[in-house]
Amino acid sequence: MSLLPSVEINPTRTPDAAVIWLHGLGANGHDFEPIVPELGLPRGHGIRFVFPHAPAIPVTINQGYVMPAWYDIKAMDLERKADEVQLRLSAARVHALIEREIANGIAAQRIVIAGFSQGGAVGFEAALTFPQRLAGLLALSTYLATADSLIGHPANADLPIEIHHGNHDPVVKESLGQRSTERLRALGYPVNYQTYPMEHAVCPAQIADIGRWLGARLG
């Protein structure tokens, strides 16, 4: 399997941790690149940031228009109409990126998976099914698209999961984030759920919280 092309931001020293961060529908790996300097990470940190680009595919809800997407969405009922075959293929391609980081000397326990919106749905599947213990999962303004079919790997049965959602989100309703949290907690995962006064986006207070959370996971 060929590796996804990615934007990479390397620390000033040899990296000893990595964050693989997946963008949302119609965006690309540059979308969250500007956030890195705003995270407030300590000077001299060793975290490499990897922002992969999704392939361009037809998207049904956008009249078949070809755009960057991790999987097709067949209807706006997001929890039930995701193309799970494509979603799992994208998760496998994230696994390949994790394995590359491990091959480059970064322990699996020092790798965080992050994702926004559609990228977060892939992030859930990729992180919870990976066969080695990871450092954590950051799920932003997203939903558990494979809630009824997820088969998590025991290695990540207690993976720390941080879920953020805007309480004015018109694209991915907050109720989807709440239901995802409830489902994951019912499966035994430790989930922290936070909301922010925003729409389908990120905000400064949230970015500061993400920086603190990454510091706790990878510091």
Image (tube, rainbow, N blue to C red):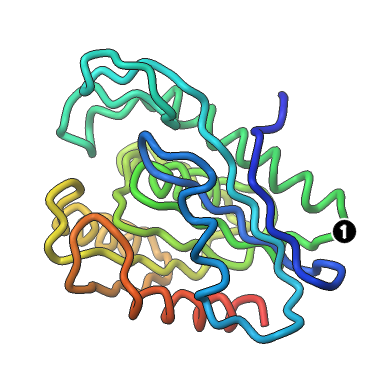
Task: Tell me which residue sits at (49%, 31%) in the image.
Answer: 88
x%, y% of residue 70? 44, 32
Q: Is residue 109 visible?
A: no
Q: Is residue 3 visible?
A: yes
Task: Tell me which residue sits at (53%, 44%) in the image.
Answer: 29
x%, y% of residue 14? 87, 68
Task: Tell me which residue sits at (43%, 81%) in the image.
Answer: 208
Task: Tell me which residue sits at (75%, 61%) in the image.
Answer: 10
- Residue receiving disc 1: 105
Query: In this rendering, would 142 be left or right of 179?
Result: right
Q: Nearer the viewer, residue 109 or 203?
A: 203
x%, y% of residue 174? 16, 59
Query: In this rendering, would 174 be left or right of 113?
Result: left
x%, y% of residue 196? 23, 73
Q: Is residue 153 above or below residue 14?
A: above
Secondary structure of residue under mark 1: loop
> Can you tell which quarter of the image residue 154 is in?
bottom right
Give the amino acid type for the residue marked by disc 1 in the picture: Gly
Q: How many marks?
A: 1
Query: In this rendering, would 69 be left or right of 95?
Result: left
Query: In this rendering, would 122 be left or right of 101?
Result: left
Q: Nearer the viewer, residue 125 or 216?
A: 216
